[in-house]
Image: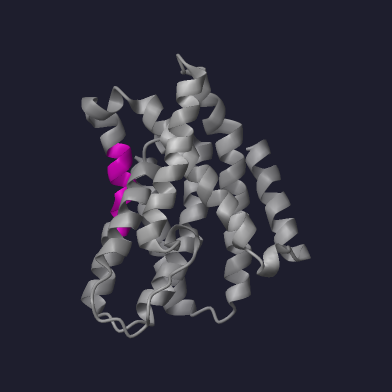
Amino acid sequence: MKHYLLPFLAVVLGFVTVYFLKPQRPKQIKILLSFSGGFLLATTIFNLFPEVYEHSDDMKVTGLFIVGGMLIQIFLEYFSKGAEHGHVHLAKDQQRFPFLLFISLFIHAFLEGFPIHGGHEILLGVLIHKVPVAMILAAFLINSSFSWSQILLFLGLFSIATPLGSFAATNFSMLTDYYHQINALVVGIFLHISTTILFESSEGHKYNIAKLVSIILAIALAYFI
């Protein structure tokens, strides 16, 4: 049950934090984003990576699925403009609902749901990744010209995408038959997202001490849990 409820609550937490606390210092969110990138990368390498190879009949084919996941994420970011790792590049006065952004984020979040019921480490990695992204997305939507009904619809559907992915992974035989192959795709997605967060988390690709410490702590936490 927790792998359905917690991803939903992570988006709610991101929205509530932005709406009530109105954080004015983006550097703090960037540090949180750096922490999430480090944690997601570490949990992917420590837990999900070995799992997909353990159930692999052909390691090279599994590698192709991982690379395929990275390419899928690059394709999604062509439409989302990098919202999955904390970037929203839309005009604040935009009137039309950003369907391409929503569809890309929904697909990304849906695929995130596949591996999370397999272990609490991956679930925690997804949650820590989702909260700062939800905060950045909520801040953009709240400051945009969209109506509250559009904002709540966007965030509401985004919040249920990961639980839907988890539900589909365990209840649809058409997908469960290819569970490990889809997880390999997700490994590629996570690798691309987490490394992009780490490389883009600072100006000029230079880490200040706070971001470096947050990444080291994230990796250490992922190792010991």
Image x and y of residue 93, in percent: 33, 85
Point out the residue furthest to the right here: 209
Looking at the image, is 223 positioned above or below residue 76? above
Determine whether, in the image, residue 145 is placed left or right of residue 184. Answer: left
Residue ID at (43%, 39%): 69
Determine whether, in the image, residue 196 is placed left or right of residue 72. Answer: right
Looking at the image, is 140 positioned above or below residue 184? below
Image x and y of residue 134, in percent: 43, 63
Name the quadrant of the N terminus. Answer: top left
Asked whether residue 108 is drawn in magenta, I would say no
Q: Which region of the structure is painted magenta?
A: 158-167
Q: Nearer the viewer, residue 153 or 80?
A: 80
Residue ID at (49%, 78%): 21
Total marks drawn? Answer: 0
Image x and y of residue 181, in percent: 39, 27
Determine whether, in the image, residue 189 is placed left or right of residue 205. Answer: left
Residue ID at (63%, 50%): 38
Image x and y of residue 118, in percent: 44, 31
Point out the residue furthest to the top here: 57
